[in-house]
């Protein structure tokens, strides 16, 4: 990607560079570069490596030797290598090799981060990288890009970085004495950086897909929340927006296809169902069974979903009805307004309820800020109105980060704006879980 790509995105978020490059000691190290662009963090690769369900099984070293993982290592939450005491089998003869393991996006990260002369990295034997590149003498290098490309179901977008081990550093609060106005200004700069990075990822994805299809996939993932982003995204890829619109003409028909493809369409009638439910499910089955064998063969299994502990209003069967309506409204859907439908009056297949929203205001606000604003920037729009973004509710990451920055007696007024709250989430990933809070002392 050429420099104009980055410059056009940068111009949409003018304060982002103040957060990113305001001081040489506090500049975020994982800066964007046009060279072999990778729109994620090293922590994404760390999470992938730690999770056997995500880690590729057919790994090879840079020299082409097969690799099997006996033990991925112990995640190191302190300074030093990313994983300690890993055990890998290398080569056709399955040589058993143990040692510490370090992860980088580019192989050059080893030298750039100064690991070669650091005694804490003396026992590193394995260098896990995303991109192929120059090997470091003495290390077994294992690139991931090609192995991941062989799995069409995998997406870094589905990795919840907060679901994996991290430690919250203790000690002094680095920005305790910062002036409140300066706090808000800096947080909002960080918020613009967060949205800029999202816009870059979207623009990168647009090199290979239509803009409305990208929006469809991102919107579907948002409806899945963090537990079911993956299956929602898979449905959006299996049934692209343009094909869905060709196959159906109403939201009910669209819902039948989406629910059938999800594998969550009830297979038989239940004696506890009311007449409305029986009629509705029969209608859905009549629509679904008319579809091609090829589409039905791609249907997900119930085991692909995380359903335990979900509130009924967040269940995929309800969220897919919202998606069915959005499919006819993109790129400007009415996020909280829906035509009368079955789920207006039913909490689940057996429970009749008072009219309830398919998508609430809080979720709609999150969709506007995290999807539509970056998408518009990625597609060339400059009318983003960042000063009018809807405010999302305070979550545990926002609370945790504000506490670690400003101490227990800070006023929440400094992060009452939508951008400031986005900024706290960006700072959490840049400084809190990466143990870099001490670098922020330079800002005071």
Image: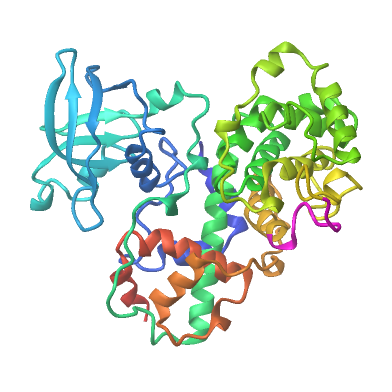
Q: Is any part of residue 65 visible from this angle?
A: yes
What segment carries the magenta color? 352-362
User: Which image quarter: residue 306?
Assistant: top right
Q: Is any part of residue 206 visible from this angle?
A: no
Q: Nearer the viewer, residue 171 or 258?
A: 258
Q: Residue at x 82, y 39 (%)?
A: 273
Q: Nearer the viewer, residue 25 or 405?
A: 405
Q: Please indicate whether residue 385 sits to the left or right of residue 13 in the image.
A: right
The image shows residue 300 at horizontal and vertical percentages of: 62, 26
Q: Please indicate whether residue 320 sits to the left or right of residue 275 in the image.
A: left
Q: Is residue 271 magenta?
A: no
Q: Is residue 358 magenta?
A: yes
The image shows residue 128 at horizontal and vertical percentages of: 27, 35
User: Which image quarter: residue 279?
Assistant: top right
Height in image: 64 above or below 407? above
The image shows residue 30 at horizontal and vertical percentages of: 37, 51
- Is the magenta region chiefly helix, strand or loop? loop
Q: Residue at x 90, y 29 (%)?
A: 249
User: Which image quarter: residue 168?
Assistant: bottom left
Label total for image? 0
Q: Please indicate whether residue 246 sits to the left or right of residue 35 in the image.
A: right
Height in image: 441 above or below 84? below
Q: Residue at x 52, y 51 (%)?
A: 197
The image shows residue 227 at horizontal and vertical percentages of: 55, 46
Looking at the figure, which quarter contains the C terminus? bottom left
User: What colouring method underlies this structural image?
Assistant: rainbow
Q: Please indicate whether residue 121 sits to the left or right of residue 404 in the image.
A: left
Q: Residue at x 60, y 49 (%)?
A: 225
Q: Nearer the viewer, residue 414 or 321?
A: 321
């Amino acid at each position: 990607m050429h420099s104009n790509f980055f410059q056009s995105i940068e111009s949409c978020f003018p304060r982002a560079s103040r957060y990113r490059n305001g001081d040489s000691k506090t500049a975020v190290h994982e800066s964007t570069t046009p060279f072999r662009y990778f729109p994620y963090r090293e922590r994404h690769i760390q999470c992938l490596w730690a999770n056997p369900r995500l880690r590729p099984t057919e790994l090879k070293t840079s020299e082409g030797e097969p690799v099997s993982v006996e033990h991925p290592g112990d995640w190191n939450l302190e300074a030093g290598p990313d994983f300690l005491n890993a055990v890998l089998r290398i080569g056709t003869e399955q040589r058993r090799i143990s040692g510490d393991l370090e992860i980088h996006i580019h192989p050059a990260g080893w030298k750039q981060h100064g690991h070669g002369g650091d005694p804490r990295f003396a026992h590193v034997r394995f260098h896990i990288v995303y991109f192929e590149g120059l090997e470091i003498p003495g290390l077994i290098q294992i690139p991931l890009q090609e192995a991941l490309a062989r799995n069409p179901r995998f997406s870094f977008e589905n990795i919840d970085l907060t679901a994996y081990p991290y430690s919250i550093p203790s000690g002094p609060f680095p920005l305790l004495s910062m002036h409140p106005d300066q706090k808000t200004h800096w947080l909002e700069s960080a918020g613009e950086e967060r949205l800029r990075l999202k816009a870059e990822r979207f623009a990168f994805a647009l090199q290979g897909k239509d803009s409305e299809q990208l929006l469809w996939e991102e919107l579907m993932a948002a409806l899945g929340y963090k537990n079911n982003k993956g299956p929602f995204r898979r449905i959006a890829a299996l049934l692209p927006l343009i094909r869905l619109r060709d196959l159906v003409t109403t939201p009910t028909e669209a819902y039948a296809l989406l629910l059938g493809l999800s594998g969550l369409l009830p297979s038989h009638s239940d004696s506890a169902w009311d007449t409305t439910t029986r009629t509705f499910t029969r209608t859905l089955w009549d629509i679904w069974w008319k579809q091609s064998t090829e589409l039905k063969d791609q249907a997900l299994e119930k085991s692909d979903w995380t359903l335990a502990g979900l509130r009924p209003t967040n269940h995929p069967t309800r969220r897919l009805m919202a998606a069915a309506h959005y499919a006819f409204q993109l790129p400007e859907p009415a996020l909280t307004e829906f035509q009368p439908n079955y789920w207006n009056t039913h909490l689940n297949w057996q429970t009749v309820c008072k009219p309830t929203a398919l998508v609430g205001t809080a979720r709609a606000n999150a969709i506007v800020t995290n999807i539509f604003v970056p998408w518009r920037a990625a597609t060339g729009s400059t009318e983003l109105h960042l000063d009018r973004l809807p405010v999302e509710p305070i979550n545990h990451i926002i609370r945790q980060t504000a506490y670690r920055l400003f101490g227990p007696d800070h006023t929440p007024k400094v992060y009452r704006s939508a951008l400031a709250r986005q900024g706290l989430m960006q700072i959490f990933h840049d400084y809190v879980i990466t143990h870099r809070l001490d670098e922020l002392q330079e800002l005071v």
